[in-house]
Amino acid sequence: MKKILFVAAAAVMTFASCGNKTEGNNNGADSAADSTVYAGVLPAADGSDSVTITLKADSTFTRTHSGSETETGKYSVDAENILTTVAGADSNFYAMTPDSLTMLGADKQPAASGLPYVLKKVAK
């Protein structure tokens, strides 16, 4: 008898906790509000590379190079505002400010060349 009451109480609590949830927007209108976009032109060995990084609220990102090559993966931000993106086995690091991302080397330091590896925030 106690088991039946326990199961019934658990079922009631489960259904009650689901009652106030609203269904997400299925047409994607909220997706732009849940992401931050950074873009710019970065120096590259063969000239320059147009890069766009979209950071989504669910800790995923999309990085597009020169409008065609796209990478997706997970990202995290540490206490020192270092953004780490991981796509497969590749990790990239960026110093994060309110308005920009500055690409860092594997040692999490800015490029010694002094070239501008900066992406500006274009949308939130």
Image (spheres, rainbow, N blue to C red):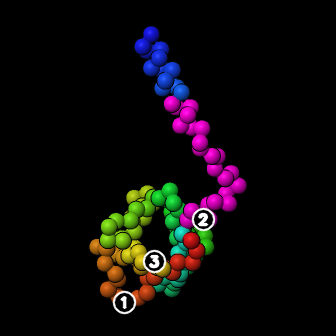
Amino acid under label 1? Gly
Q: Between residues 6 and 33, which one lies in front from this camera angle?
A: 6
Lower position in the chain sequence, tag 2 or tag 1: 2
Amino acid under label 2? Ala
Whether pointer 2 and pointer 1 mark residues with C-beta atoms closer than 8 Å, the reply is: no
Secondary element under disc 3, as helix, strand or loop, is: loop
Structural distance between the alpha carbons of marks 1 and 3: 21 Å
Residue 106 sits in which quadrant? bottom left
Q: Which mark is residue 33?
A: 2
Amino acid under label 3? Pro
Q: Is residue 99 visible?
A: yes
Membership of 88 in magenta stretch: no
Q: Which range of residues does the magenta coloring cover? A: 13-35
Residue at the image point whose x is 41% and y is 88% from the top: 115
Q: Between residues 34 and 67, which one lies in front from this camera angle?
A: 34
Q: Which mark is residue 114?
A: 1
